[in-house]
Image (spheres, grey):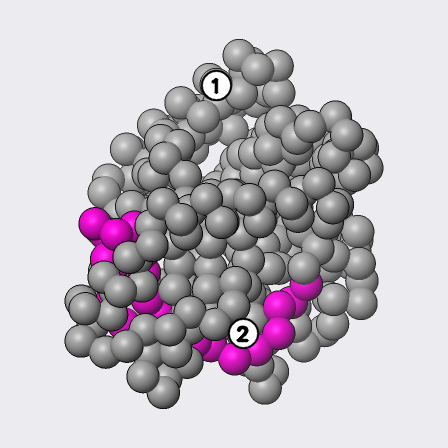
Amino acid sequence: MTRSLRSLRLSVNILYMVQNPQLFAKLSERLGARLVPKREISNNGKCSIWSAELDDRAVVVKTRITGDQFYRETFRNELAVYEAFQRHPPPVRVPAVISICEEEGAIVLEYLAGNLVSADRYPEESAWTEHTVAEIVRVLEELRSYQGYALGSSITVLHGYYECWGSYIERGLYTEQDQAILDALKSRSDWCAEFNHGDPIPSNMLIDGGNLRLIDWEFGGAYLPLYDMSVLWVLSIRVPHVQTEIQRRCLAMTRSYQLCFAANLLRVVGRETWIHGRLPDNHPSKSSRQAMLALLFPRAREVMKEVLAA
């Protein structure tokens, strides 16, 4: 991280703490126990994550530090996901919720031990050990069965994809031909929306004792099936054999799920391209990541053509 970026984030966090001097006191009062912040784990300018102690128990406090409408909505979405987890525990290991404090813009969670799969969004091969890849795939597959979150109708989810396609066509990321994959899926009824993490990047995964734990659920919700697997395909761009295995696994499924996988590949590549296109021109990773992503659109379209031709 550059010195200027570190300074900016530190300034943002100091401003946040000055403007909210009673935050931890309010949380302590709500919890009926003394909540003491220890250190800031991360700060992306939108959310700040702190390690803390609740009496003698290690916890994590996630707080929203921006008034930006998009991030207010993703924070509310994360609250809804954790509320669903409280009512209906998911089939995979996630942080237990201690308190949801919507008014204060904070979530207090169980502290989970473990190491990040990688701090790099697009890790080198060393991060993708055979066991790690198998564990990620296992967890993402198990998550697909979760029924505790209200998914809404599959048609509504598909409509959301059409809206996404429209915005990306306007931005020049997609062509009109890219919509053919959605049109093919629209004519079929042998699939349904599934709950996915939505952002299973390596820094949102912890490995502890060989077991994977998923954290940060801001984008959890209803997607076309295999969305998380498509994210994994995109983020393993530097490790072709991992990409090949994910693709083989997903294309061995029924035709509707093949169509979903191909549609999700395009959606994730579009998302990644848009995200990195918005980075400042002097960002140290912008040019290299854009070059990588430029290789992914042709690959994703090859998968789409293969599935449509089947």
In percent of width and height, residue 204 lies at 54, 60
Q: Which quadrant of the structure image shows residue 187?
A: top left
- Position above or below: 173 against 295: above
The vertical placement of 206 against 310, above or below, is below
- On the image, numbered disc 2 is attached to which residue? 212
* Numbered tag placed on residue 8 in the rendering: none
Residue 286, percent from left and from top: 75, 34
Q: Nearer the viewer, residue 184 or 197?
A: 197
Horizontal side of residue 163 vs 298, given as left or right = left
The residue lying at 42 percent from left, 69 percent from top is 37
Amino acid on which the number 2 mark rests in the picture: Leu
Q: Quadrant of residue 21?
A: bottom left
Q: Which residue is mark 1?
A: 167
* Residue drawn at the location 48% of the way across and 18% of the way down: 167
Counting labels gives 2
Rendered location of residue 101, percent (x, y): 23, 57
Q: Earlier in the sequence, mark 2 or mark 1?
A: 1
Measured as percent of width and height from the top left, residue 91 is found at 36, 72
Q: Nearer the viewer, residue 216 or 253?
A: 216
The magenta stretch spans which residues? 98-118
